[in-house]
Structures are given as structure tokens and as C-alpha cells.
Amino acid sequence: MSDDLIAVFQEELAELLESLERGLVDLQENPEDAGLINQVFRDLHTVKGSGAMFGFTDLAAFIHDFETAFEKVRAGDVPVTPELVRLGLAARDQIPGLVNGDPDPNGDRVAILDALRDLTSGVATDVVVAEDTVVIEARQSDAPSVLWFRLSDDALALGARPDIILSELKDLGATQITADLSRIPSLDDLNADQCYVAWQMQLPAGVSPSDVEDVFMFADAEWTLTPTEVVETVEADEIDDLLAEAPSLDAPSPAATQPKTEKAVAAPAAEPAASIRVPAARLDALMDSVGELVTVEARLTELARHSRDPALLSTAEEVTRLSARLRDATMTMRMVPMRTLVSRFRRLILGLSSDLGKPVEFVVDGEDTELDKTVIEKLADPLVHILRNAIDHGMEDPAARAQTDKDKVGCIELSAKHVGGEVHIIVRDDGRGMSPEKIRAKAIERGLISSEAQLTNGQVFALVLEPGFSTAETVTELSGRGVGMDVVRRTIEGLRGVIEIDSKLGLGTTVTLRLPLTLAIIDGLLIEVADERYTLPMSSVKEIFELPLDKRTASRNGDYLDIRGQFVPFVRLRRLFDCAGDPPTEQNVVVVEAGDARVGIVVDRIIGTNQTVIKQVSKLQQGARAISGATILGDGTVSLIVDVAQLLAMSGPLIEPKKEVAA
Amino acid sequence: MTLSASHKIVITFSIGPQRLAIPATDLREIIDPLPTTRVPGAGDFAPWVVNVRGAVLPLGDLRLPLGINDPNPAERPEDARRFLVLEAIIGGEATTVTVMADIVHEVATIPLKSIEQLPANSMWPSEFIEGLFKGPEGEFVLIPDLSAIFTAMAQRAAVA
């Protein structure tokens, strides 16, 4: 088996495991949801099928037993209990090990399977069997049933053999096999490579859907299995359900060498949206090319403008429009919904909530909000950290909540939404909240701020993100908050995002992550200092004005500007970047903002705005902390992108009296 | 076929008075000098970036890690200068970098057995040199360990 195929299998497996996890966790909340149970079952079945196909026999055997247990759940014999979900998750966690061929020295796998078997056997009689369950029950084994199937249009071309399928069905005991010829077209329209015939037959009692499914393992076919005797008693909508379910029960794609490419269908595949799985590297390569195109387009536009040739001008305009469209399309391709992250969080909360004995309801809003895939990948760890803090430290235990008239079950809300060019991800808890006074006192004690510092509440809460705000000695309300929060901040800032904290003592804490939609392209403001051109992210630029004459030379009291009654510190980029030569007589100030802090940047000249394709700078140059990336200008030279958040840190804002720069 | 087992194909070039050689497999291309952009605060090893066909690459100066002292930089002919685009492993990650060369000489096939270890008490930093061999005029040609150099320089930049 080639490595490529194994890689495809691994990739598919990762997705299935995620879907399985999500399904199991959701089952905990909706134990009755037949759709979810079916989804779990399908995921298991697909893992088993492709595992066996790729020669992971241990895996297939393990999942077979796992599946057998869930078969009973699906049949309605066994109810979904928290214990079942727990065992299911534990079994799921064994799968990567099985694929890697890890040994199982403690016999965990066998123990899990045994526990699953114990849990799912012999319970059936205890369960009060609801009427509709009887129907399902009957459908599956006690009654003979009618099977109808039709191969998909391209199944023959892909190697399906109706004769083999029919003989296998015959082995299952099929009788009264009749062909349904209704779809056969006139001879002119007949495509010899296509199978137009459908078949119908009687299957004896005791043949379960999974038996039939096995027959269709390698053929792409549409089939339905209907119990004969109970047809009249089945509700119409139940038939619909059954029919809707049928396509998603499709066996894996017939070409055995090419595992299924679509996701195990979470929703009934009523309107199958065609999708193609593409390696991330190819998307990155495409993005790079588009980036270059945008650069070339800028150059073309400039040439056209100089030439004043109307034909060239209109062509350049066309290219501009096209490249903008291409850029947008490419960026959309890189977008991934938040949902891919959320299942992991659900499980985390579920686990923590039972470990800590703090019942918590986890509400998710805006799972469909899309973000650049690189952003999503990097967000996972910070969000885990924030959520863990929320439940571990933010949430009171039930007794304390009862005392304060709060609902015994706490609430943690994760929401994501698009706001302008940003995505806001908000984690809100209704726990004990934080006291600004205590944080302030502690920050003074730690030497993070001076005792005279005038801070807004937002600035005070931002202090828990400081590296020095350790929690070795705990203040009750804050215990633990701040452990690693500086790492969270660094990650978010690395994504050119901002983290904001708000809290009301006794009512809860809200952490907001504000992130740019994409990491690949931003609007930039091109500025010049000492003949060097730098780019400032437009999103952080607040205003631009001329530097007042009296501020031309550095003042001993520090450089401050009076902007409509507010004092704003400013830095001279010439000095910060060690530029040679003297400043021109007229300089400009660009006021930039990150979080709550504002700073003016003195530059020689404003050149204009441009579309900036961000390129990373090499590790060799990570010493340049005030630089977050680079971009290529229309004339082919490189302009560096100024990291505004770092610049703010370096310029020594009000809250950071130390000269040292937070890394 | 047998050649690659017993021989190494290298590109030889000079920085100042020092002749150097790098394996042809590490070299992506040799280009005429490009406009450079200074990176403030990036340190003295790779203080610039250049645009090589749409990629922003650091431009390094091997003088610093190899301790090459050029008494007469003005004597190096301006039009012989080249940038070498190289593939190196920085901290386990494949990276493309450029370095400056005062002049590029030739592609040479060197018998592996002619490559010697650096003598124990040499003037060269042993951690950055893979080996050396005798050039056509009897001078020593150094084979720098690019990955070691760039990894060390990246660490230096990180703590700077």
C-alpha cells in the first residue's frame, strides 16, 4: 500500500474521529436523537471499512466489537447513558493507538470493550420498549423485508458487478428477485457503460441492514430496506426519514484504491454539496501565486498610469478587477468554520465539569463563523486555556453559587461572529468575576505598574496577560488566572489579533479575541522614513496629522501630543529604527491603536495605501521585534510591516514603565 | 553514478580573501545583486531582506560566523558580486536564504578523500566548518556547515 494512500486514510481517519467525538458528546446532551446515533454508527462503520481495506486488522476487529455495542443502541435495545458516552469516547481514543500499532500493555482496549459489552447486553428486557422501537426492531430482524437497490450512474464504469451483488444477496436468502426496468431509455439515449436496471427482492427475517450494507461495501448504490409486514404501521414521515437516510448509508466508493473523499455525512445527504479535499500546501502555493499576482498588478497599474495609454489603462483596470476576484476566491477557500474546533471544547468542558464537580452548561453560538485555516489551527490552544480558566477559576462551586442566588449550573458561552474585517470570538462565563482593585494591588506589588498609574478597567484587566503577573501566591478571586495567559496573548498577537478582558465582580468574566479575517493580505499604509519604506496595517491606523513644530525636538518630559485634550505618547520611527541622517522639516504623525493603547508614530512622509500581501520574515531576523512581516512593493523592493502591538510595547505605554520589551 | 559516491560537486566562491565551497545540492541559484531592504534590529548577521522572485528572503553575511576579515573590501570588483540562494536547515526546518559572495568561481568535482577535517587548532570556528580541501592554487577552500551556521545565527537573533 503506497504512502500516499495511507496518508489519505490517516487524513480521513482524523476527520472521522473528530466527527465521532462530536457525535458522542452531542449524544450526551440529546440521548434520544436517532440522527446522532446513526451518525456515530456510520462513522464507526466507515472507520472499520477503510481500516480493514488498508490492512489494519486489529483496528477493524476492535471497531467491530465497538460497533456491535452501538448496533444495539441503534436498534433501540440500549439507551444512551453518560456511561455509554464515556466508554464510547474512551474507545474512540484507542483508535489512533491501534492505527499506529501501539501496544496495549494494560489491556485497556479489552477492558473498554468488555465494559461496553456488559453495558449493552442483557439490558434490552429492562427497557420499556416504546412503540416505535418495536417497529425498528421488527424491521431489523423479526420480519422479512423488501430490498430495492439501484447502482449509481457511474458504478459500472468504476467496476461494480451487479451479478456478484445479486449472487451475494441470494446467499443472504433473497427470493422473488425482480428487475425494475422503468428507467431504461430508448436505444438512442442508452449509454452502454451505465446500469439502468434496479432490482427488488424479498429478504428473509433476520437479515439486518448491516448485512445488506456489507454487500454494498464496494459498490456505489442507492438502496432501501423496508420491512414488509409493518409497512402499514410505519408513519409516513418515518419512511421519509428512512429514505433520507438511505443515500448516506452508501457503502464506501467502489474504487477500492480510492477511499471516499466526502466526509462521513453528518446531515442527511439530501443536497450533496460537491467538495474536493485539497492538501493545504497546494492552497498555500495558490495563495502565494495570487500574492505575487497582486504585486504584479500593482506594478502594471503604475506603468499604465505613467503611459497614459487608454488601452493599457483599461487593460490594467481589468487585471485589477480580476486579481481582486481571484484573491477573494482564494481566501474563501482557506476559510474553515469554527465548528471544527468546537467539538474538542465540548469534550474538554464535559471532562472538566465532572472532574471539578461544577456542573456547567456550554453554549456555543456562531459555529459556522469562518476563519482562515491558519488562524483556526493556532486558536485551539489559547481557547482551551481560556475555557479551562473559565471553568476552573472563574466558576464557583455549586454551593457557593447557591449562596449567591445563582443557578446551580454555571454557564459558559463561546460565540464567534464577524464584525467588519474582524472575527470576534467571545468566551463568557457567569462565574465569580475579577476585582479590578485586587488586580491593581497585585500589579503594583509585582512592579508591573506604579502606584500612581491611572488605568481604565480594561487596562487593569489586561494586566493579567502580563508575563510578570504570576499567580504563585493566589488571590482568591484570581487564583490561577494569568497562568500562561501571557502565552495566550502572545499567540493572539502573533495572529495580529487583540485580546480584551472585561469582568464584573460576582457576575462573571468575558474574554474577547479580536482577530483579522485573514493572515494573508491586509490593507497597508505605506510610509517613508530616511528613504526607507515601511507598511503600517491600516486597521490599526486611527488618524494622521502633521507633527507640530514645537515637537520636532525631543522633550525632556517625554514625547506627548495633545489630541483633543487627550495625551498620546509618540515615538520617532527614525530613532527607533536607527535611521541615518536628519529628519525633514515637515514630518507626519500616524496615530495607531492596539487594544486600549494608542501611540503616535512620527514618520517623514506618507506615501499612500496599498494592498499588502504578507510574507513572513525568516527566523534569522526574529531579533527585529518591531517587524511582523514583509511585503513586496510595485517596484519589486521589499517593505517591512511594522508590528503595531510590539511598537506600543516598545514605546513604553502608560502601563509599562519598565524599559524592557515584553517578548 | 559511482561519481556521486566518491566525489562531491561543489560551487566555489570567495568572500574577501577567503575561498569557500558549498555542495551544489544546497545551492538553488546564483543571482546578480538585488536591491536590499534593511531590517532594523535584525542583528549583524542577516540585516537585510531581498525579493527573490516574489519570496522575501534574508540576506546573510558569512563574514561574521566564519570570522573572515577583508582588509581591502574596495578592491573587490563591484560587478563580480553575486547573491547565492541556498537551502539550509534552520532548527530542523528547511529554509531558503541568500548570502553575499564577492566573486563566484566555478563548479568543481572534488574527490571525497581530498576533503580533510579542520586541523585542531585552526583559526576557523570548527563548529561552522564541515571540512576543507586544497584549491587549484594550493590555497585552502573551506566547506561551511550552512545549517549549523544559520541555526546558530537564528538562535542568536532570538535572544538578541
Image (cartoon, coloured by chain):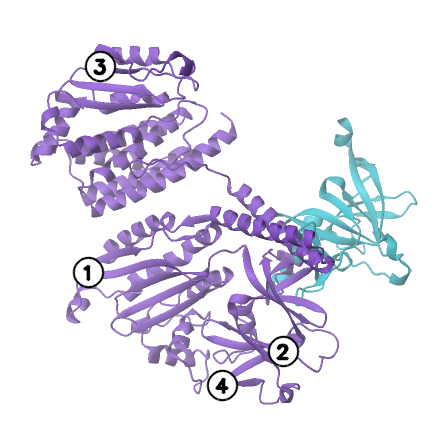
On what subunit does the disc labeled 4 rest?
A: A
Q: Between disc 4 and disc 3, whose residue precedes?
A: 3
Q: Amino acid at mark 2?
A: Asn
For badge 4, the amino acid type reads: Arg
Nearer to us in this view, A55 or A603: A603
Mark earlier in primary sequence (4, 2): 4
Q: Which chain is purple?
A: A
Give the residue number, with chain letter if any, for mark 3. Answer: A201
Along the horizontal axis of the image, is A284 left or right of B6? left
Q: Is residue A20 above or below residue A444?
A: above
Dots 4 and 3 on the same chain: yes
Name the residue carrying label 1: A409
* Kind of element beneath mark 4: loop
Q: Are marks 2 and 1 on the same chain?
A: yes
Label at residue A564: 4
Percent from the top left, x then y, of residue B139?
89, 48
Chain identifier, colour cyan = B
**Identity of the amino acid at label 1?**
Val
Are both tags, 4 and 2, on one chain?
Answer: yes
Q: Quadrant of residue A575?
A: bottom right
Spatial CA span between label 1 and label 4:
48 Å
| A322, A432: nearer the viewer | A322
- The CA span between labels 3 and 2 is 84 Å
Marks 4 and 2 sit apart, C-alpha to C-alpha, by: 17 Å
